Image (cartoon, rainbow, N blue to C red):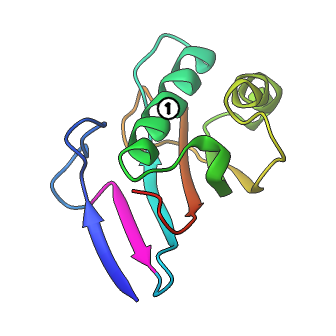
Amino acid sequence: MQVTLDNPADAPQPASPYYSQVARVEHADGSALLFVSGQIAEGAGLAEQTRGVFEGLAALLRAHGATLADVINIRTYLTDISRLAEYGAVRREFLTGTPPTSMTFEASRLFRPEALVEVEVVAAVSAGGA
């Protein structure tokens, strides 16, 4: 097993120098698990921020030969859990297949004060994927 930490140049960059955006755990058969750091996005409201988050996640996965269809686990942090349905409606625009395993939490605040949502994912990449 080999672990590679990465900040792909053509994807969102980390908000600080203290973490990597993607940890790729490569297995002997060429398959891999991708652990993607929590993503936030700018935007005026929850729906706009959620779209930005999923676009950022897609870019990070794409840099490692994966798509949102490869996501097997998702963790969501909302500053207001009563807005779960609004978040879920946008999430379904991006995760259209069988839903991954999931956990959703309410957090009193996130990394940036204006952030309403943060999402982190784990994806499985078949052998031969980037």
3 inside magenta stretch: no
Residue at screen point 20% across, 61% down: 18
**Residue corresponding to mark 1:** 53
Q: Position of residue 106 (x, y in %)?
A: 67, 46
Farthest residue, direction front: 128
Of 117 and 97, the residue lying toward us: 97
Residue 50 position (above or below residue 99): above
Of 67 and 51, the residue lying toward us: 67
Asked if one can make out residue 9 in the rendered structure from this viewpoint, the answer is yes
Judged by its main secondary structure, the magenta piece is strand
Three-letter amino acid code of the residue under disc 1? Val
Residue at screen point 30% across, 37% down: 11
Q: Quadrant of the C terminus?
A: bottom left
Q: Is residue 49 left or right of residue 91?
A: left
Q: Which residues are magenta?
A: 20-26
Q: Position of residue 79 (x, y in %)?
A: 61, 37
Q: Is residue 40 left or right of residue 126?
A: left
